């Protein structure tokens, strides 16, 4: 089963465009001899990099979620380049819940050692958090599944957790 979230907003494009315009403006202003010329040029470079990051991360990047047996596989596609971003077993799942709109989920669920953001949209409205244990440390994955994908994922988590409730991940084992 696969699901590819659709883009819901265009905030990253607006931010990238604004940062690029501000970078060009600051660079043009730095052409005049002034004591603040190096500051304007540095600010132009920083704004250009910020705009480029927003453009690549939220405009050109797509995530595809896939369930294969007891694995959640997330593909990250940037342009024509497609890589497997993560491949997690559902047996390591602790909980899947909707991301709170305000506040931090770490207050309720403890400190996470790693948090992975696999959302296609910037500030998504309906994101979910998948908490799992890896190397005996709690980690979180933020993603945007639809209701059908989420229901199937929860069913598989329940099914596979019942088969091996005490299984843990040991990264020192040979594969």
Image (tube, rainbow, N blue to C red):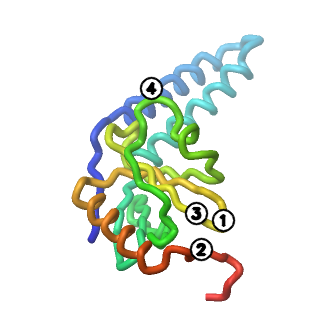
Cα–Cα span, label 3 and label 1: 6 Å
Label 1 environment density (alpha carbons within 10 Å; few <14, some 14–19, many ≥20): few
Could you say where residue 8 lies in the image, as x and y percent from the top left? 27, 40
Question: What is the spatial separation of the Cα atoms under label 2 and label 1, in whole angstroms?
Answer: 8 Å
* Location of the N terminus (image quadrant): bottom left
Could you tell me which residue is drawn at 36 percent across and 79 percent down? 69
Q: Check residue 18 in the rendering and tell me which mark sits there, or answer none.
A: 4
Examine the rendering and report whether any part of residue 32 can be seen. yes
Label pair 2/1, CB-CB below 8 angstroms: yes
Q: Which residue position holds label 1? A: 136
Q: Secondary structure at mark 3?
A: strand
- Residue beneath label 3, please? 133
The answer to whether mark 3 and mark 1 are in CB contact below 8 A is yes
Disc number lying in front (1 or 4): 1
Q: Residue at x 47, y 40 (%)?
A: 54
Cα separation, mark 1 vs mark 4, equals 43 Å
Measure how far apart labels 2 and 3 are at the Cα level: 8 Å
Q: Residue at label 2?
A: 168
Which one is in front in this view, the residue at disc 4 or the one at disc 2? 2
Left or right: 128 with respect to 112? left
Few, some or many residues within 10 Å of mark 3 (<14, 14–19, 20+): some
Residues at marks 2 and 3 touching, judged by CB atoms closer than 8 Å: yes
Identify which residue, 148 or 12, lies in the foreground.
148
- Tell whether 35 sits left or right of 134: right
């Amino acid at each position: 089963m696969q699901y590819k979230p659709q883009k819901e907003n265009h905030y990253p494009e607006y931010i990238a465009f604004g940062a690029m315009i501000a970078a060009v403006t600051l660079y043009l202003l730095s052409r005049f001899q002034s004591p603040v010329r190096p500051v304007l040029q540095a600010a132009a470079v920083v704004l250009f990099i910020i705009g480029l990051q927003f453009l690549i991360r939220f405009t050109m990047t797509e995530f595809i979620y896939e369930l294969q047996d007891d694995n959640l596989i997330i593909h990250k596609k940037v342009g024509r380049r497609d890589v497997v971003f993560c491949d997690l077993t559902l047996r390591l799942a602790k909980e899947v819940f909707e991301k709170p709109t305000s506040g931090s989920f770490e207050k309720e669920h403890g400190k996470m050692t790693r948090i992975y953001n696999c959302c296609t949209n910037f500030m998504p409205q309906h994101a979910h958090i998948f908490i799992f244990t890896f190397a005996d440390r709690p980690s979180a994955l933020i993603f945007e599944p639809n209701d059908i994908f989420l229901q199937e994922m929860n069913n598989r988590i329940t099914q596979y957790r019942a088969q091996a409730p005490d299984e843990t991940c040991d990264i020192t084992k040979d594969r």
